[in-house]
Image (cartoon, rainbow, N blue to C red):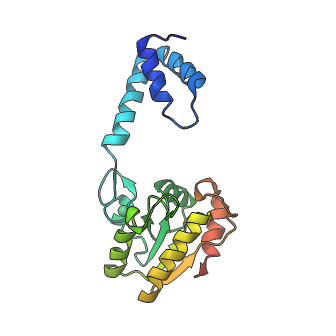
Amino acid sequence: MHYPEPIAQLMESYMKLPGIGEKTAARLAFYTVNMQEEDVTRFAKSLISVKRDLQNCSICGNMTQNDPCDICEDKNRDQSVILVVEHTKDVISMEKMQDFKGLYHVLHGVLSPIEGTGPEDINIPVLIKRLQKDEVKEVILATNATVEGEATAMYLSRLIKPSGIKVTRLAHGLSIGSDIEYADEVTLLKAVEGRREM
Ligand SMILES: [Zn+2]
């Protein structure tokens, strides 16, 4: 089927999104044509803004508009505890719980020998530097309960423990293979409360 060029181009962009095939892309593209002009403009602006106005915090790696991020800048938070997560989305899940008052460190991935992801490829070197100069007493490893998440937690534990900092791992009320992103707040709270020393 031959689509008008602007539609074809828009479809091509929609198809770059996860889980969107040609049929859905066509439906979305034709829907967009019928949207209010101001809604379309706002949509286009927000697409550009998420790329242009966001950066990773130079301290914790969290996605932010200001560097350092609001969490790192908040002196009321417990500076002695750092919770290590895979992605910015995990920080948002943890913050929704409103119970964790320490700091974060976002790895932006996990170690994966199969995909060739080593410690230098994710935000580990910055974490190690951070632990050397900050007053950190505990590191909570909150990588997901997947094979790579567990391996990353083990690696970090071995790396950090010799420095005398307490290393803990989230309790797995989070079942094996489940992601922090999808855990509800009560489950997350229990996982943090029941964390065990590694
Ligand atoms: Zn930060």
**Relative image position of residue 60 (x, y in whole percent):** 37, 64
Describe residue 68's horizontal placement relative to residue 31 as left or right. Answer: left
Describe residue 18's horizontal placement relative to residue 45 as left or right. Answer: right
In the rendered view, would you say 12 is above or below 85? above
**Relative image position of residue 142 (x, y in whole percent):** 55, 68
**Relative image position of residue 2 (x, y in whole percent):** 50, 10
Which residue occupies 31% across, 44% down?
53
**Relative image position of residue 183 (x, y in whole percent):** 64, 57
Point out the image quarter for the N terminus: top right
**Quadrant housing residue 51:** top left
Along the line of sight, the residue nearer the viewer: 43 or 152: 152
**Quadrant housing residue 196:** bottom right
Residue 79 visible within the image: yes
Which residue occupies 41% across, 13% down?
5
Residue 164 visible within the image: no
In the rendered view, would you say 74 is above or below 162? above
Along the line of sight, the residue nearer the viewer: 84 or 40: 84
Which residue occupies 34% across, 74% down?
130
Number of residue marks: 0
Splitting the image into four quadrants, where does ligand 1 fall?
bottom left
Which residue occupies 41% across, 15% down?
6
